[in-house]
Every structure is written in structure tokens, then in C-alpha cells.
Image (cartoon, helix red, strand yellow):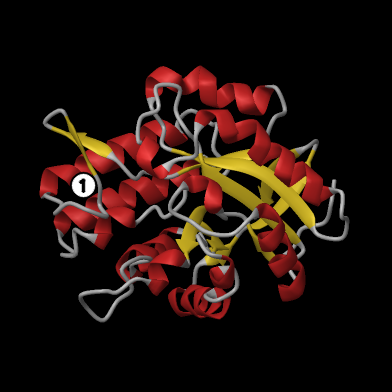
Amino acid sequence: MIRTTDKYNLHTHSFYCRHGHGSIKEYSDEARRLGLEMLGFTEHMPLPDRRFAKTRMLNEEMDQYLDDIETERKDGGLLILSGFECDYIPEFRSYFASYLEEGKVDYLINGVHFFKRKGEYVSPFDDVMERDDVYTYRDVLLSALDTGLFSFQAHPDLIFASYREWDDVSESVSREIIQFAIDRKIPLEVNGNGMLRPSPDDDYLYPRRMFWRLASEMGAYCVRNSDSHEVVNLGKTRELQESFVKECNVKKAYPIVKRGRLEFEF
């Protein structure tokens, strides 16, 4: 077991994801320069049927990715963790679980980037979201967290990047997501990547303030991560994240590694 730390980043992407830049070594070196104590790599996990392949590493690259992480671990000092960010698909539950059960990774995180509308996949990044989509997003997210496989929920408010109106649907779905996470002691992520994206209003694209004010009111815990896809962004939003958490008065969860698995202290 190691002590908890507030100097961490647990959501990190590299060139492997096909829409990012930077090697595992370059990120590790930057983390050391920034004075981080814990760095977790969470490349987008490819699916067995190669779904979403345009923005995922090749299936045959997974072992090399994990080998690169293992090489950097040996340098000492910085605690480096291996993981994947998953788009949960129920039919592949055993596939996701095998990486934890066989000790191939230290943790998995859940990120909802796609869901179906009338049989076709849509994304909050690319499509205009409708009221019904907010409910579908909720269902996909909660079904993933209900498996118990994921250490935290990445960008839980991503749907509101494109569904900008804060209405009865936004609030009710947010309350459901937040309460579900509280009941299962799963931290929710304040995501730095959304802070760097252009926004159509005076709020961040994500994290959304209304969501996080509710999270504070209800008693949820957060983790803060860069979700960096470029080495230069690993530390760029750390102060913004911290200011946002203080502004919204959200309680922080602290990562700790026990028996080779990422956990959190509250």
C-alpha cells in the first residue's frame, strides 16, 4: 500500500489512441518535471470487434502499450499505473473484466463517448443532442458503473457539452448520475480537457458548473484529471481544476493503491 496523494493525474492519453500525441516516456518525463507523484495511463481501450477503431489504438498494439508503461515504472520515483478508458458495451463485459482479474492493468475507467439513437451511434462531440439522448446517455453510463469494474467515471457531464440548456431533464438526469455514484462510492471526474475546448457560453464546455454545484449539494466526491492528449496539456489545467473544485465546493477523493489495484480514500 502507498500513501494517498493530491499530486496525480489518472486520465492520460498518448499517441496510441490515434487522436493524441506523445509517447509514454514523454508523458512520464513531464509528470516528473511537474512534480506529480502518481501518473495513470488510460488509453482508449479497443473492442474485440474493432468498433470505434478510428479513434482507438489497434488491438495488436495493446501489449506494446502495456510494455511501454512497465518500462517507465522501472525508472522509480514516480508511481506509474496502467489502465484503459472504456466505452462500456454489455456484450464485452467479460473482456473488460479479464484485464482486471488477470492483473494486466491497475484500473479501468468509464467514459461515454458514443451511444445509439435509432440504431446509429451518436456522440456528444459531433452531434446535436436531443432530450431523449440525455436519458440514453444516463442509461449507458449507469449500466457501466453498475458492473463495479470502473474506478471512477470520466467526464460524467460530457452530454452537456452539446445539450447546453439546463432544464428539468438536465437536472433530473444529473441527480440520478450523482446519486448512483454516491451510493456506490465512485468518484466523478472534473475533466481538464473540456476546459481547453471552445464553449458557446460563459461556462466551460465541460465540466458544467450546474452539474458540479448539484454534486456538491448532494455530497459527491471528485477526482481531477487533465484527460491530456498532448504532453504539453498534462499540467496546463491543474490550477483551473483546483479553482473549479473550490468554486463549486466539491469534496475530493484521494487515490491510493492497495494490492495492485487503484482505490480511493474519501
Q: Position of residue 34 (x, y in %)?
A: 71, 74
Q: Quadrant of residue 171?
A: bottom left
> Horizontally, is 77 left or right of 81 in the view?
right
Q: Quadrant of the N terminus?
A: top right
Pointer 1: residues within 10 angstroms few (<14), some, or many (20+)? some
> Residue drawn 53% across and 26% down?
96
> Horizontally, is 32 left or right of 208 in the view?
right
Q: Nearer the viewer, residue 173 or 103?
A: 103
Total numbered badges shown on the rendered structure:
1
Q: Nearer the viewer, residue 96 or 208?
A: 96
Q: Nearer the viewer, residue 237 or 220?
A: 237
Q: Quadrant of residue 149?
A: top right
> Horizontally, is 89 left or right of 136 in the view?
right
> Horizontally, is 27 left or right of 141 in the view?
right
**Residue picked out by circle 1:** 134
Amino acid marked by disc 1: Val
Label 1 secondary element: helix
Q: Position of residue 255 (x, y in %)?
A: 69, 54
> Residue drawn 29% across and 41% down?
114
Q: Position of residue 86 (x, y in %)?
A: 47, 38
Residue 220 in sight from this viewpoint? no
47 versus 14 height, above or below:
above
Q: Quadrant of the C terminus?
A: bottom right
> Residue drawn 76% across and 46% down?
257
Q: Position of residue 238 (x, y in %)?
A: 57, 74
Residue 110 in sight from this viewpoint? yes
> Residue drawn 41% across and 61% down?
215
80 versus 205 height, above or below:
above
